[in-house]
Amino acid sequence: MAACEEEQAVVEAPVRAIKTLVVTERAGTQERRIAGITESSIVTDLAFQVAGRIVSMEVEVGERVEKGAVIAALDSEPFKLRIRTSEGRVADAQAKLKDTEAKYKQQATLFDKGFATKTAFDSALSALNSAKSAVDVALAEQELSKRDMRQTTLTSPLTGSVTEKYVERFSEVSTGQKIVQVSADGGLKVKASVPEGLVRRLSVNDVVQVSFPTLEGRLEPGKITEVGTRAGSTNSFPVTIVLDNPVTDLQPGLTAEISFTYKTQATGKAFLLPVTAVLATEPKVGGTVFVFDKEASVVRTKKVQVVNVHNNELEVTGDVKKGDIVAVAGVSFLVDGMKVKLLDPKHAE
């Protein structure tokens, strides 16, 4: 008899576990997140103003430098030789000038007494002027050689950090060749590449939020300062955001995530749901979602209208409301009143 009762017992179907999300109010706005990289607002490439061989390189990438700190130095021996050569030329020019002045005075005296011709006097005066010019040229060359000597030491014009290093010690460098890049402390900007569909919604001075995944998601407010008008190779546009008041532990080269918020086509209250949450019932405009009923532990169907599409998300209006727990996967296997359980029970709290 007991065996017959067991055969007649109804075996209950397992309760389906569903993946869900809690609906949040969008009210006609859309948020897109784009990755970017921090850069210093003030960046300078440093270079020697003379050519030579680097004998000293005092910094590495990432190292902090103070204003006036020595970055690198060239071999100074050739420049010292040029100074000594220029000093010799100055001495020679000055000696010639002294001799020419004596000859001029002699000719001037003779000319005043009528013992020298006008031609001889003019020739002595011309020689004197040439000797003076030669001294001036020699002195200028001496100053240039001293200036070149001073420029064999490269110093930082600002306080910050080294973000690029282009050459190594013992390299032969030319005038103006980049040696290192230094980024100033303080101002930071974020560079991002924005897809075509989003860039047309952005404007200079728009306020955005920037988060930093490596710094526990820290949020920093910023403002768009540049919106590119020419697409790059990936059909995206460059956008620059300047952070309002970056804290000291933010540095160039950090990965950032920029949240762009902009108005959409929706009127009234609209909500953002994954494409997988909506079961299409009316082509292009309408659909059904399954909302979890906490009291009965079942799903209930609700009608929605699709007002906008953003990649893999739909902006909808209709019977859903803020706080609803909506199924976002496997909706084609659900029916109204079906008993379910939540994969994430916290959504029902």
Image (cartoon, rainbow, N blue to C red):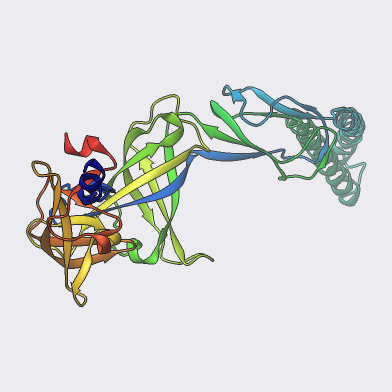
From the viewer's side, name the closer residue of 105 and 340.
Answer: 340
- Percent x, y of residue 316: 16, 61
Answer above or below: position of 303 versus 136.
below
Q: Quadrant of the N terminus?
A: top left
Question: Can see residue 313?
Answer: no
- Percent x, y of residue 57: 76, 28
Quarter holding residue 96: top right
Total labels: the figure holds 0
Instruction: State the residue at coordinates (84%, 46%).
Output: 126
Quarter holding residue 223: top left
- Percent x, y of residue 318: 8, 61
Answer above or below: position of 308 versus 343.
below
From the viewer's side, name the closer residue of 130 and 81.
Answer: 81
Give the farthest residue toward the front.
1
Relative to 126, 281 lies left or right: left
- Percent x, y of residue 3: 26, 44
Q: Quadrant of the C terminus?
A: top left
From the viewer's side, name the closer residue of 82 and 297.
Answer: 297
Relative to 50, 344 lies left or right: left
From the viewer's side, name the closer residue of 82 and 217.
Answer: 217
Question: Can see residue 200?
Answer: yes
